[in-house]
Structure formats: structure tokens, C-alpha cells
Amino acid sequence: MGKATRSILFACNMNSVRSPIAEALARRLLGPGTRVESCGVYEGMLDPFVAEVLLENDLPVPQRPPQTFADVDLAEFDRVIALSPEAAAEARRLSGNVSYWEIDNPTDIRGGDEELRRAYRLCRDCLAERINSEFQSTTAISPAS
């Protein structure tokens, strides 16, 4: 991962889907030596499908309520990774130092619960692959159970 990354902030629209999944995956991969948090542009609440797909991989469900950019200090993070265009714009407005990863929003899928679960799993697995690739480690996180 180049120079040692000691702190990462993942951001999306409402800190309810993509960013909490990324936070849980990165925490598992990078361990306690790296501070990993997430936030959103707007206030939201954790999506119940997120808890489901995290638990499928024995990943912890976030215990704190979703937070916004107003709740975090971007200067405290080595890396800010935006997972939506809105989050990228807000992070750039606040700090300028941001990476943007294009990750499909599973809430855009229309259909029944099984179609939604597949979309959320795909989001989780895409994030796992990207995090593994970006923060190469000898202990890769498994994208799917």
C-alpha cells in the first residue's frame, strides 16, 4: 500500500450501505493498527440488508449510528475514499485529498428480497476485491462465504 496508511475514512451518500460495508471489510483486513471509519454526506440509518450481508461473512455490524462529514475531521485521516460521486464532491470541497471508487449502489436495484440480497452481496464482494487490491496483505478477506 505504499507508505503506511494508518487511518482511512470511507464515505458514501448516507453512511448506510457502501461505506459501512467498506469499513467492516477494511477493519478485518487491516486489523487494529489502522483506524478505519465511515461517514456520509447526509444523515441516514443503517440499511438492514447491510447487517445481513456482513453477518454472512462473520463481519461485525456497526454499533454506532451513521455519521456525516460534519461528525468527522478529514484532517485526521491519511486516506479518504469516496464511494459515491456526491461523497467525492463533498470530500474534495472539505479537504481536496480524496480517492473515488465507483461502486454500484445496491439500493438502485428493483425487485424482491432475493434480487436485493444479490445486489448487496455483489456490492460487498466488489468492495472486498477493491480493498484487497488497494491494501495488499498476506491475509486477504474473503469476498463470499
Image (tube, rainbow, N blue to C red):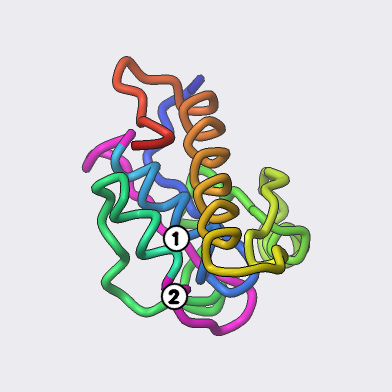
Residue 54, picture quadrant: bottom left
User: Which disc, if any, is residue 88?
Assistant: none
Q: Residue at x 56, y 33 (%)?
A: 130
Please, is residue 91 above or below residue 3 in the view? below
Relative placement, left or right, of 48 versus 138 is: right
Inspect the magenta stretch and tell me whether residue 36 lies in it: yes
At mark 2, the secondary structure is: loop
Report x, y in % for residue 113: 53, 68
Please, is residue 83 above or below residue 126 in the view? below
Please, is residue 44 above or below residue 140 in the view? below
Inspect the magenta stretch and tell me whether residue 90 lies in it: no
Q: Badges 1 and 2: C-beta atoms under 8 Å apart?
A: yes
| Amino acid beneath label 1 | Pro
User: Which disc, if any, is residue 20?
Assistant: 1
Q: Looking at the figure, which quarter contains the C terminus? A: top left
User: 91 and 131: which one is in front?
Assistant: 131
Of callouts 1 and 2, which one flags the residue occurring earlier in the amino acid sequence? 1
Q: Residue at x 45, y 54 (%)?
A: 21
Real-space Cα separation, disc 1 to disc 2, in angstroms: 8 Å
Report x, y in % for residue 9: 49, 54
Q: Residue at x 36, y 62 (%)?
A: 52
Magenta span of residues:
29-48
Q: Residue at x 64, y 53 (%)?
A: 82
Please, is residue 44 above or below residue 82 in the view? below
Relative placement, left or right, of 6 versus 99 is: left
Relative placement, left or right, of 70 versus 34 is: right
Q: Mark 2: few, some, or many residues within 10 Å (few <14, many ≥20)?
A: some
* Residue ID for mark 2: 46
